[in-house]
Amino acid sequence: MASRPLPPADLQRFERDGYVVARQAFPAADALAMEERWWRELRDTHGIRRDDRSSWRAIPGNLKAAKRDPAHAAILTETVRGVFDDLLGPGTWSPPKDWGLAAVTFPAPGRWELPTHFWHSDNPCEPHLDRPRGLFVVSFIGPVAPRGGGTLILSGSPFMDRETLVEGVPLRVVELTGEPGDMVFCHPIMVHCGAPNRGVRPRFTRIKQQFLTHEGRAQFRAMI
């Protein structure tokens, strides 16, 4: 994949709404190979089998071996490097040691309803008030359909300075859905929330809560 700058419309979306979507940021074949490894860990560690829906159930925490899997180095393509350069600046960041939580949400019965609790941001606001010094990154390992457990974000929330409008742009809930290899890059203080999975397959995503620049990491360390 050749590196390419983000289109002006995507940069404007990030500046206005706080997020940008990169379709096929890394190869779908690599994502699906990772998904196979996740299923093997689910089988070997939790007794959950892909071909036995009666075994599908919530697991405690997130997958451990999947988080450490060196195959996830394939996510850092030239396309992804280009997005980081465009949003954070060339030379301001280093390749991540991992791509965050290996999150699995299995389907469960019931109505899909918009959560009213647990909306939050994972990064302290202070280092990012004038400009983002990091990103909140979601990588799709398997396909995630609408109402299939995708993370919910509050579009525009990083720039919220009044009750319902930000610079004339209304805040709205956006459900992050996608295909294997897609990625979503969010402002580091994006307000977000987990969502129920009312679909037909598990939701497999990597969630990097704090992808910080060198400056952002130094400021974060100074605060703790």
Image (spheres, helix red, strand yellow):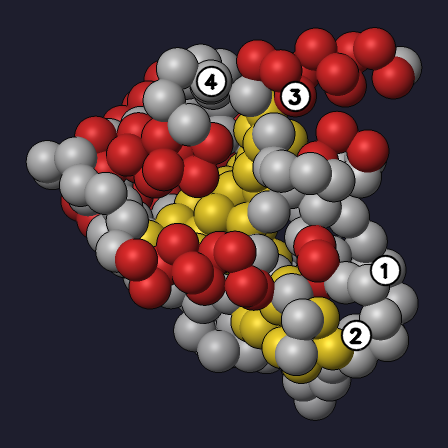
Image coords of residue 70 (percent x, y): 36, 18
| Residue designated by label 1 | 118
Question: Element under label 1?
Answer: loop
State how far apart marks 1 and 3 are (Cα). Answer: 25 Å
Image coords of residue 149 (percent x, y): 58, 67
Circle 2/circle 1 CB separation < 8 Å:
yes
| Type of amino acid under label 2 | Pro
User: Which quarter of the image is occupied by the N terminus?
Assistant: top left
Residue 115 - label: 2
State how far apart marks 2 and 4 are (Cα). Answer: 36 Å
Tell which tag, 3 or 2, sits nearer the viewer: 3
Circle 2/circle 4 CB separation < 8 Å:
no
| Type of amino acid under label 3 | Gly
Tell which tag, 1 or 4, sits nearer the viewer: 4
Residue 92 - label: 4
| Residue designated by label 3 | 216
Question: Element under label 4?
Answer: loop
User: Which quarter of the image is occupied by the C terminus?
Assistant: top right
Q: Which of marks 4 and 1 precedes in the sequence?
A: 4
Q: Which of marks 3 and 1 precedes in the sequence?
A: 1
Dot 4 alpha-carbon crowd within 10 angstroms: few under 14, some 14 to 19, many 20 or more:
some
| Type of amino acid under label 4 | Thr
Q: Residue at x 42, y 60 (%)?
A: 12
Q: Residue at x 48, y 78 (%)?
A: 146
